[in-house]
Image: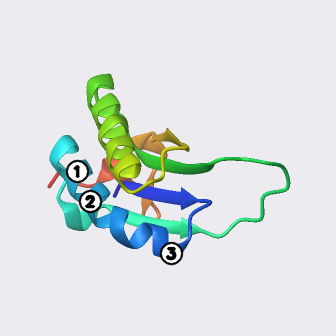
């Protein structure tokens, strides 16, 4: 965990950027790369909307979120995808459940 959710992208567009984004996020957030999950959502836009990247994760310092968003943007620009919205959905550890128990019931690794 965290989850990176891509909307409005083709699979071909993501082949190049996902490995770079997960590597950069791992370095920036100090989370092992294998724990970062990436998903592409196929959605039908009912109104015009830009491609977006939603990052679902636990709260970090604002500077870490800023660095993540900035580094992802640089990767996207280099891949020719500059018009993408990036946003975070912050999870609350007490409201995240694993095997039916709050994450706070599990020892830290």
User: Which quarter of the image is occupied by the C terminus?
Assistant: bottom left
Secondary structure at badge 2 equals: helix
Gap between marks 1 and 3 measured at Cα: 20 Å
Q: Is residue 69 left or right of residue 56?
A: left
**Residue plotted at (51% across, 50% down):** 53
**Residue plotted at (62% across, 60% down):** 8
Residue that mark 1 sits on: 24
- Residue 46 image-quadrant placement: bottom right
Secondary structure at badge 3 equals: helix
Q: Alpha-carbon neighbours of circle 1 within 10 Å: few (<14), some, or many (≥20)?
A: some
Q: Are dots 1 and 2 in contact, CB under 8 Å?
A: yes
Gap between marks 1 and 2 measured at Cα: 6 Å
Residue that mark 2 sits on: 20
Q: Between residue 105 and residue 8, name the one nearer to us.
A: 8
First in sequence: mark 3 vs mark 2: 3
Q: Alpha-carbon neighbours of circle 3 within 10 Å: few (<14), some, or many (≥20)?
A: few
Q: Position of residue 28 (x, y in %)?
A: 20, 42
Q: Position of residue 48 (x, y in %)?
A: 79, 48
Is residue 99 visible in this depiction of the protein? no
- Residue 98 image-quadrant placement: bottom left
Secondary structure at badge 1 equals: helix
Looking at the rendered image, the disc whose residue lies closer to the viewer, 1 or 3, is: 3
Is residue 43 visible in this depiction of the protein? yes
**Residue plotted at (31% across, 55% down):** 21
Q: Which mark is residue 11?
A: 3
Q: Is residue 80 above or below residue 38?
A: above
Q: Position of residue 65 (x, y in %)?
A: 34, 33
Q: Alpha-carbon neighbours of circle 2 within 10 Å: few (<14), some, or many (≥20)?
A: some
């Amino acid at each position: 965990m965290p989850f990176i959710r891509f909307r409005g992208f083709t699979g071909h567009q993501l082949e190049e950027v996902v490995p770079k984004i997960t590597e950069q996020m791992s370095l920036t957030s100090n989370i092992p790369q294998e724990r970062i999950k990436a998903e592409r959502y196929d959605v039908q836009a009912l109104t015009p909307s830009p491609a977006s990247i939603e990052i679902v994760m636990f709260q970090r310092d604002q500077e870490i979120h800023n660095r993540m968003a900035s580094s992802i943007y640089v990767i996207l620009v280099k891949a020719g995808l500059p018009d993408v919205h990036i946003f975070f959905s912050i999870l609350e550890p007490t409201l995240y459940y694993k095997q039916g128990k709050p994450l706070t019931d599990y020892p830290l690794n």
